[in-house]
Image (spheres, grey):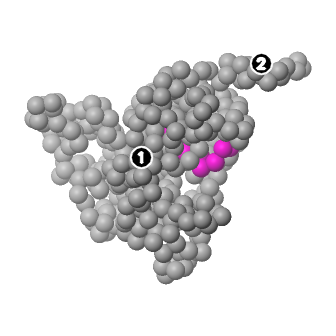
Amino acid sequence: MTIQDELYSIVVHYLDKVKRSGSDEIMAICPFHRKADGSPERSGSFSMSLTKGLFICHSCKAKGNLRQFLKSMGASTTALRHQYGPVIDAVQQLVLPRIDHTKSKAPTNNDPLPESFLGLFDYCPLDLIKEGFTEATLLDFDIGFDAKHMRITFPIRDLTGKLVGISGRTVTDHPRRYKIYDQEYTEWGMPPRKIHMGDVVWNADRVYPQVYFGQDVQLVVVEGFKACMWLQQAGITNTVALLGSYLKQGQQWILEHLGGVVYVMMDNDDAGEKGAAQIGASLSRSLKVRMVTFRPTAHQPTDLCPTEIHQAIEQAEDFYLWEIRKGQIHGIRKTAY
């Protein structure tokens, strides 16, 4: 049985009115929303690739990969690992596109952690609730709390959606605010592991389906976990985080192959401005890049209300115009060669 046949047998089990759409995709009734009067759709708006397992609803905009779909349909952790594990692994290998390695290197592959590992951190971090995040947002991103080390936990996934690591943010006065777990895994009977964070674009696995099914999709790039979740909560669903101010080579590879129109929204500080310039210069060679600025009294996107976030993105300017304007402000003249 081919991957397409296996995926088709899965979707017909969970979805209604499944119809083939070309050689690679199916259309069906979306399981994630109903009409305004509470009745189900009559015509399908849900689309899934039968080779990559990526899905999107063209009506309610729900999107994700095969693992996320099955989890949403109620598949247990055991079923995800044993019943569906082989087909999930197979389609994950097909998500990454063919690339020109002479231009940039592909990200490093990391052996995945079991999804059940997140059960160790299945607590709601109240500090983020106090900061304005909803419990629904935290659940959506699988944010938890590590009571052993007193850290809020952020799952780290690769572009295919595999769980490859954990980052923890302390809630104490520990001088090291964020920590990428390495030796900590030994405390749970696992070998230590190291993640190349320059190969990680946080939330890229959730954004990829939208990019796969769309053209010139708006892709907002921010610095950190919280900014990414804050924009998502405000309705900017195609947001990813670099987990730093600067773009690394592996991250550039990911963003170039996500494609779309990149909106750079760094923090309002010197590192953020310098990082924005570097990101814009690196990505503008291959992608459309727009620069997002916001009121100077706001240090980072989490200081903005939803209306301000949408206005800032709507008013974003082309990278080259932004670069000229910044040069004029700082009295910088370009050198003619």
Q: Where residue 79 sits: x, y (%)?
A: 27, 66
In percent of width and height, residue 212 lies at 43, 36
Magenta stretch contains residue 243:
yes
Q: Position of residue 275 (x, y in %)?
A: 69, 39
Residue stretch in magenta: 239-246
Q: In the image shown, does 25 or 117 lie closer to the viewer?
A: 117
Q: Quadrant of residue 245?
A: top right
Point 67% across, 22% down: residue: 322
Report whether 289 appears left or right of 305.
Answer: right
Is residue 211 found inside the magenta-colored segment of the image?
no
Q: How far separated are the C-alphas under marks 2 and 1?
A: 37 Å
Quadrant containing the N terminus is bottom left
Q: Are marks 2 and 1 in contact (CB under 8 Å)?
A: no
The residue sitting at 59% across, 60% down in the picture is 178
Magenta residues, dominant SS class: loop
Q: Would you call the spot at circle 2 few (<14 residues within 10 Å), some (14-19), or many (20 or more)? A: few
Return the residue nearer the eye: 142 or 150. 150
Q: Kindly state the secondary structure of the residue where label 2 is placed.
A: helix
Q: Is residue 232 or residue 331 the one in the foreground?
A: 331
**Amino acid type of the residue that numbered disc 2 sits on in the rendered structure:** Gln
Query: Taking 197 as reference, is 46 above or below it?
Result: above
How many numbered tags mark residues here? Answer: 2
Q: Which residue is mark 1?
A: 132
The quadrant the C terminus occupies is top right
Mark number, residue 328: 2
Residue 9 located left or right of residue 336: left
The residue that appears at 69% across and 35% down in the rendered structure is 273
Q: Residue 130 appears at what percent x and percent y?
A: 42, 52
